[in-house]
Amino acid sequence: MQNLKIVTKMFFLFTALVFISCSKDNTSKIYKQTQEQLEEQLHRTDLSNETQFGIINQIAKNMLATKDYNSLILFLTSWVEKHESDPYNAYWLLMTANAYLETDAAPVASYYFERIIRNYPDLTVQGKSVHFLSLQQLIQISTQPANRIKYFNQLITQFPNDVSITEMYYRLALEYEKEGEWTQAIRTYTLFVNRDDAATIQLSDIPNAYQTAKQLIDFNNSSKDWTFETIESLMNAIKNAISTYDYRKLDTYKSKVNFFAMSWQQDENADNAQSSFSMRSYMRGNKIHYERDIDSMSSPTEAYLKTWGWHSYVNVWYLYFRKVNFPADPEIHGRWEWAGIYYGEKL
């Protein structure tokens, strides 16, 4: 942005010095006088766009400094309404929207952020894109997944160099999930995991983002033929296979995606927790027992069955079952799977 005219710059410097030197008792009077003088300057007809911008910006900043948000909103919206050709109107509306945020009026702020993006070409002020700042704010305050989907897509397509595309893909996929658009969600999760930095990206509010996305994709691409309609039918099948020492059936009952075998202290997503071993070597020559009923720590979505006799080193295994959470396929969603094994007595 070009420098303001020297006379305007000197005027701003003078008013700043006056503010510093005056006492608190005179601040209100000086503030009023300064604003009046600035508005008087604004009415001149020989101002360049840059000088005009500087005066309006100073008036607005003075109002912000005193937290006079109502006056700021009235001043800026009136200016935009009366000066439709002002090339900085998008910026004035951005200040208006932020003022509404300061007064806890997020819905009104959203209206102005949307208006900027919809009705005004992008504008760079002090090195910052007005559209980019508006989209960032809209993502923060919007509560509707459909709207957030639109905003994330705009950030990805319009500002690819200003955001982490990897993170944007993950957050966009989450919004597709919330909206029930599962085809788009899985497609976007796939875009996410295919990014070079997906496995190492750290999202403070989303632990294990990569593992979660990959598990969902792998499950979507699998046969899912190991699931059972009810926990009772799954438990009966498992118990029958143990009683008859049929390791082949036990192997077919295990989840083919992300099956884990680990101690109680381990993280299910840890690399050494993922297992694809056969039950054969643990059943041969051993007498395996199981409890009649599921363990008391079970819930409507998770179940545990205590078994023992597997191995002299770790004798007790808790078989872990869970309800399948996969709304993308209503025929599979809500069924039960054998998802893993916990070694040792429960903690």
Image (cartoon, rainbow, N blue to C red):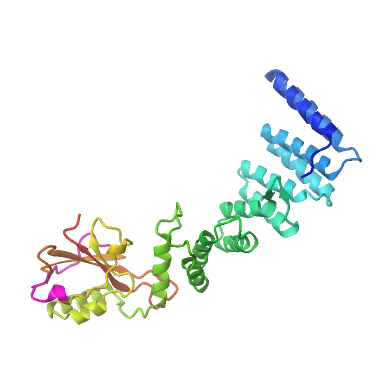
Q: Is residue 277 magenta?
A: no
Residue at 90 percent of width and 37 percent of height: 44
Residue sitting nearer the eye, 298 or 47? 47
Quarter location, residue 304: bottom left
The percent coordinates of residue 50 (x first, y second) are 81, 43
Residue at 17 percent of width and 65 percent of height: 317
Q: Is residue 290 magenta?
A: yes
Quadrant containing the C terminus is bottom left
**Horizontal side of residue 304 vs 125, given as left or right:** left
Residue at 81 percent of width and 29 percent of height: 10
Quarter location, residue 258: bottom left
The percent coordinates of residue 200 (x first, y second) are 43, 58
| Numbered marks: total | 0
Residue 144 in view in this figure: yes
Residue sitting nearer the eye, 286 or 144? 286
Q: Main secondary structure of the magenta part?
A: loop
What is the magenta range? 281-300
Residue sitting nearer the eye, 26 or 8? 8
Q: From this view, report whether residue 251 is shown above or below residue 293.
A: below
